[in-house]
Image: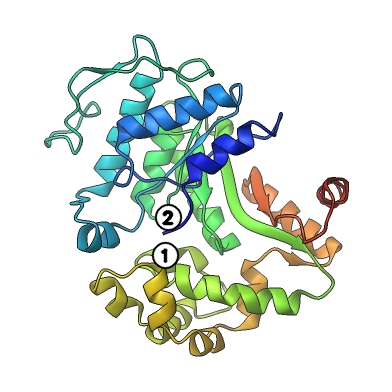
Amino acid sequence: DGWDSFAVLSALAGITARTTLGPGVVNPWHRHPNLIAASVATLDRLSGGRAFLGLGRGQVEWYRRSLGIQALRPLAALEETIGLLRQWWSAPHVAGGPSPGQGEDPVFPVREWERSVAPAQRAPGPPIYLAAVGPRALALAGRLTDGVLFNDFASETYLREAIATVRQAAADAGRDPARLAFIVRANVLVTDDPGPVLERRKAGFALITTLPGMERMVRSPVHDTAAIVARAREAMRTVETLASGGGFPALRRAGDMVAAKSAIPTALMAELCVAGPLPLVRERLARMATIGVTEVTVSPPRTGETAGEYAARLAALR
């Protein structure tokens, strides 16, 4: 329901030189794997080999009920997509058939389709990071991808268990777990007054963690997050809105955001968000690195902040 990510990324490719560029994330329903292959290869060429792909299942309820897309067997669809992309991004750039070992008919019955434009990066092509939450998706990431892209509000408790699951799956598949990336969309923010920030981010919590399956990533040793998410879900009318096929705009209209935010303790938000004074933020980042997190996202520049000021703010986090 928002901007087209690859159009924006292509524009950024022309005005940046070192930054890696990629969507976080696209799914194989809105974009067929063939289109994903083309989009990423094009971005990689435009950026001189700086592209990556964030891939996920998306919210299949929306696609089935509102967009007329079947969106069946999402995990199989992701596995097939990864296999197809690797074939298209490697010589002879011909893909076809399901991934090895699948007994069912393929979700994407591609038959010897050849692509003429390959990425700038050598085979197997740009990195693929899987947006994964549940154990089967995490295991898939460990077996086949370059790492995991974790969503907003992923707790340290969840991250510790999830990263261990991915690493074990990689080792079982004969891959080197140390080569995997674990990226957290933390939106890190240094501020001496985190209260207003945490209050604002409750809105994102109410929209994201109330979706099916997302509550597992906010597990906490001190908060009853299942009950908290249930209350927020009820206030947001998430179940009813999803049943009618509504997306984020419909959730914002139908939900009682004030009631949802009041159900979310600020102390929980402080546990889930990396926001606060610099010493606190650096301590949190150090703990995340110990868990295995390799990269985090940082809040964008403030209004009026220069590139130099923003660079200095980033440097202070190290």
Where does residue 186 sit, x and y in percent of width and height?
A: 63, 57
Whether residue 70 is situated above or below residue 100 in the rendered picture = below
Where does residue 160 sit, x and y in percent of width and height?
A: 56, 54
Whether residue 233 sits left or right of residue 95 in the image: it is right
Tally of numbered tags? 2
| Residue 223: quadrant of the picture | bottom right
Whether residue 169 sits left or right of residue 34 in the image: it is right
The amino acid beneath tag 2 is Val
Whether residue 317 is situated above or below residue 258 in the rendered picture = above
Where does residue 4 sit, x and y in percent of width and height?
A: 46, 47
- Marks 2,1: beta carbons within 8 A: yes
- Is the residue marked by circle 2 packed among few (<14), some (14-19), or many (20+) residues within 10 Å? many
In the drawing, what numbered circle is on residue 313?
none
Element type at mark 2: loop
In the drawing, what numbered circle is on residue 214?
1
The amino acid beneath tag 1 is Met
Whether residue 153 is situated above or below residue 317 in the rendered picture = below
Where does residue 198 sit, x and y in percent of width and height?
A: 67, 75
In this rendered view, identify the residue nearer to me: 20 or 184: 20
Residue at image location 35% in from the left, 82% down from the top: 237
Tell me which numbered mark, 2 or 1, is placed earlier along the sequence. 2
Whether residue 238 sits left or right of residue 276 in the image: it is left
Residue at image location 41% in from the left, 80% down from the top: 253
Q: What residue is disc 2 on?
A: 133
Instruction: State the separation of the CA atoms marked 2 and 1.
Output: 7 Å
